[in-house]
Amino acid sequence: MPAIITLTTAWGAQNFLSAVIQHRLEVAFGLKVVVLSHSVSKYNNNEAAWQVKNASLILQEPAIHFIDIESVYSTDQSRILIESDDQVFICRNNGIISLLGKSVKKAYHLPGTTDSLVETLLEQFDLALNNKS
């Protein structure tokens, strides 16, 4: 089981959103949430991948890396879950995983089932943590 959740997003000055999601994830799953950045440029896969790639190399424990650089700009909340060694990545299926240079062991589709970004994220993290496809 992962010990840490990292968040890398383009949520920017929407501090209320990042604070609410960080708190809800910590309470719901009892894991430490580390914010790598909420200031990645909108749709900038290279910038987000750089942040996550370096963090995943430094972390000594298993982690779930959540990368979201477009969902607040879209009604589609579906994402993919990628398992790679002891790291798990949750992101849009937009090619960002290829920029991380990680080998893909398993990949799953995580549907966006609600209209609420917060509730959808909680459901998707629950699927990730409980290995449900």
Image (spheres, rainbow, N blue to C red):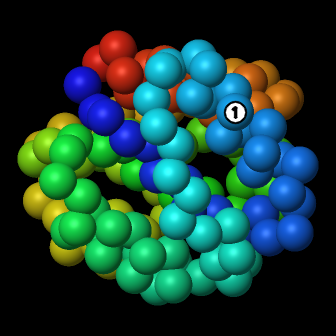
Residue located at (38% from left, 41% from top):
4
Instruction: Name the side, left or right, on which 35 lies relative to 53.
Output: right
Residue of label 1: 23
| Residue 98 seen in the figure | no
Residue located at (64% from left, 63% from top):
9
Residue located at (64% from left, 78% from top):
40
Instruction: Name the side, left or right, on which 13 lies relative to 21.
Output: right
Residue density around tag 1, few if under 14, some if 14–19, many if 20 or more, within 10 Å: few
Please state the horizontal and vertical placement of residue 84, each as a whole percent of the image: 17, 49
Frontmost residue, 46 versus 51: 51
* Looking at the image, residue 113 lies above or below residue 87: above
* Looking at the image, residue 52 lies above or below residue 78: below
Frontmost residue, 52 versus 120: 52
* Looking at the image, residue 61 lies above or below residue 132: below
- Residue type at mark 1 is His
Quadrant (top left/top right/bottom left/bottom right) for the N terminus:
top left
| Residue 57 seen in the figure | yes
- Which image quadrant for residue 81? top left
Please state the horizontal and vertical placement of residue 126, each as a whole percent of the image: 48, 19
Please state the horizontal and vertical placement of residue 91, each as a whole percent of the image: 49, 52
Instruction: Name the side, left or right, on which 128 lies relative to 61.
Output: right
Quadrant (top left/top right/bottom left/bottom right) for the C terminus:
top left
Instruction: Name the side, left or right, on which 18 lies relative to 32.
Output: right
Please state the horizontal and vertical placement of residue 122, each as a whole percent of the image: 62, 25
- Which image quadrant for residue 41? bottom right
Q: So how many labels did they put on this image?
A: 1
